[in-house]
Amino acid sequence: MKNKLSFYLGVGFLYSFVCYYWIFYTLYKFGEMNIFLVVLLFFVFLVGVDILQFGSVYLFQKLYKFNIYMFPVSWISVEYLREFLPFDGFPWYPVGTLIVHVPILKYALAFFGVYGVGLFLLYFLVSIKSKKQFVFSIALTIFLAIICYNYKSYVYSFYKDKPSIKVATIQPNIDENIKLNYYQFEKESLVYFPLIKKAISEKADLIVLPESAFPFLYSDYKDPVRELFMYYTYYKPFVVGLVDIKYKGNKILPTNNAYSFYKGNMIDYYSKIKLLPFGEYMPYPFKFAKKLFAAINGIDFVPGKSMKPINVIVNGHIYKVATPICFELEFSSYVRKLSLHSDFIINLTNDAWFGPTLEPYEHNDQAMARAIENGEYLIRSNNSGISAIISPLGYEKTLSYGKKGVRVGYVKPYKLKTPFDMFGYKPLVFVILGVNIFYFYKFGAFKKRH
């Protein structure tokens, strides 16, 4: 039993290190902390994630007498719970996200979501142990491929005659060390304006800028860079990420926001609700660490209160646009709810924090998954990349990581109601409950006979 626990936790530690190395990079690069303290904090984080994911899976498997065919249920149950725990959730890169790299089968995301697909992938892997189970999983895969192929044809026919709008996503590639210095950032942010002019010259109907695009606060009306930016909003509609600050007595309440501008006016905004723990706020019981991590200046962001799409006006037409900001894109259930009544999705983010790690690529994979799950076009504006325009079938036009530029493409602002969009993870919950009932009924009957 101890050997099995050690195996689960050992594999889990290695998996977590590869998956979350970008956190170590961020702490080391921007934390201004002693390297030994960085290693210690990262080690504590890995142990916590390891115990939560792999330790919990071990406990489930212990309950199932280590039945290999119950492993997919154990794993996906814990992954799904991570949408809500710990803190306000930390569902980074569920195993089902890998399907975005598999032609045709990736459209299973539109039916089952990332956790449902993860259950299928893990079952396929464990089925290799039994010839009978493996034959069944092959037959199931073929059946699923047929459904996905027909779904692809349906999506093509749905969008075939729909009008499109021309959009431009801007990637300035401003180094995070510069962004952390207000005066350097203000000077460097002038790089946006040649890119905006290029987008206008290419006749984009809508221009999208990344999370915390400028150093000024939204409410800092006298900032000269703000005035220059507002000049361009008279000519084209914009969606842009900006920080703003409100005050409650002497308490500072910063928010991370997506703003919609049209003809020189701000017409709507969304404030980020799902904040990144240890990045945008320090959760209990780690409040003491705020003073250790210089990049957040000891200040916690506060979550927004209204989960709604924002109004975006393009060519005189008002569109409803879901705007998950950065980390929110990882929450499959949250993005589904946010985009239920939207026409397309815009994701504003800044992956310059994470440097040349796997994070920007993992983040982009999840953007593709959200586009397919919700049957909508998705526009990403990422400070350092990867920026992209993604179709509901997961096809994308991208700007590579570390590049500066403008990507222009077309989106069709119409939502296709996918099965996942309609039912969410209710079918998955019923399947997991059904499998558990069957397993314990069968196991109980077996015990009675023997």
Image (cartoon, helix red, strand yellow):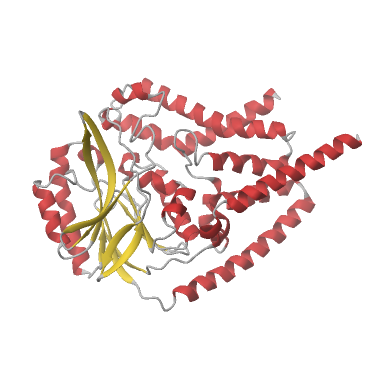
The image position of residue 362, as x and y in percent, is: 44, 47
Asked whether 361 or 412 is in front, the reply is: 412
Residue 32 figure quarter: top left
Q: As displayed, is residue 172 above or below residue 415? A: above
* Residue 82 visible somewhere in the drawing: yes
* Residue most extreme to the front: 249
Residue under the image location 31 percent in, 25 percent down: 290
Residue drawn where x is 42% and y is 64% of the image: 391
Q: Residue at x 56, y 34 (%)?
A: 53
In the image, is 441 to the left or to the right of 323? right
- Looking at the image, residue 363 sits to the left or right of residue 72; the answer is left
Q: Position of residue 124 (x, y in %)?
A: 67, 51
Quick check: 271 above or below 291?
Answer: below
Answer yes or no: is residue 69 visible: no
Q: Nearer the viewer, residue 370 or 432?
A: 432
Instruction: Identify the image quadrant of the N terminus.
Output: top right
Residue 17 placement, left or right of 75 = left
Q: Residue at x 18, y 43 (%)?
A: 217
Nearer-the-camera pick, 340 or 228: 340
Residue 107 location, quadrant: bottom right
Q: Give percent across and percent down for residue 64.
A: 73, 35
Quadrant location of the C terminus in the rendered image: top right
In x, y percent, where is residue 253? Answer: 25, 35
Q: Is residue 48 left or right of residue 230?
A: right
Numbered label tally: 0
**Above-or-below relation of 427 to 183:** below
- Name the outermost residue toward the bottom: 161
